[in-house]
Image (cartoon, rainbow, N blue to C red):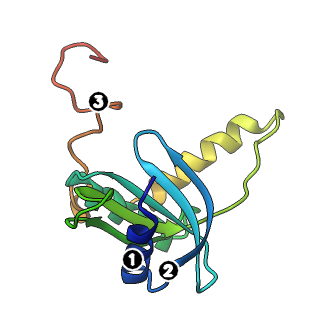
Amino acid sequence: MFGTGELSTWCGEWLGSPPVRTLFERAHLSTVVGLRPADGREVVVKARPFEHRLAGCLEVQRRMHRAGFPCPEPLAGPVLVDVQGPLKGLAVTAEARVPGGTVLPPRPDAPELFAAAPARLTAAAPSVADVPSSAPAPPWNGWDHGHPRLWP
């Protein structure tokens, strides 16, 4: 999906190490590629249309990671690519890959366990005033719509 040379150049410049192996590649609303750079890390590189709100989203993620919330550590970006190639005009970010995870099986305390995660997220989140804006809402979310109904 990305030009191999272009992605390799981007990783060398922004991550300090070019990729030597592709772990996975997916595309839907953005293109996402799992990579192993030459330095041995595992990273996830994402490319999507540029929006100013990406800076705010990434800063929240960075602060959540620093606060100990279990989310991937942002490593680079958002970088608006302005050179010719498949990445031109896209915002590219990179984060540490966090493998694993398990599905919570049905059990009596499942509701409490599910509720604990958003409570922990809310407690660790920075103040809206302390990070760049994440507006406007992405089109599939629409929380800030101006319509009188609940969902436009």
- In the picture provided, is 39 more to the left or to the right than 9? right
Secondary structure of the residue carrying tag 3 is loop
Tag 1 residue = 9
Inspect the image, locate mark 1, and give the three-letter code of the amino acid beneath it. Answer: Thr
For badge 2, the amino acid type reads Pro
Please give the residue where the numbered disc 3 appears in the rendered image.
142
Distance, label 2 to label 3, CA atoms, is 37 Å
Whether pointer 2 and pointer 3 mark residues with C-beta atoms closer than 8 Å, the reply is no
In the rendered image, residue 82, in percent from the top left (x then y), is placed at: 19, 65
For residue 32, above or below residue 136:
below
Q: Amino acid at mark 3?
A: Gly
Above or below, 150 relative to 117: above
Q: Residues within 10 Å of mark 3 (few under 14, many from 20)?
A: few
Q: Which residue is mark 2?
A: 18
Tell me if 13 is positioned left or right of 97 in this view: left
Q: Sequence-wise, which precedes: disc 2 or disc 3?
A: 2
* 1 or 3: tag closer to the N-terminus: 1
Residues at marks 1 and 2 touching, judged by CB atoms closer than 8 Å: yes
Seen at 22% across and 61% down, the residue is 132
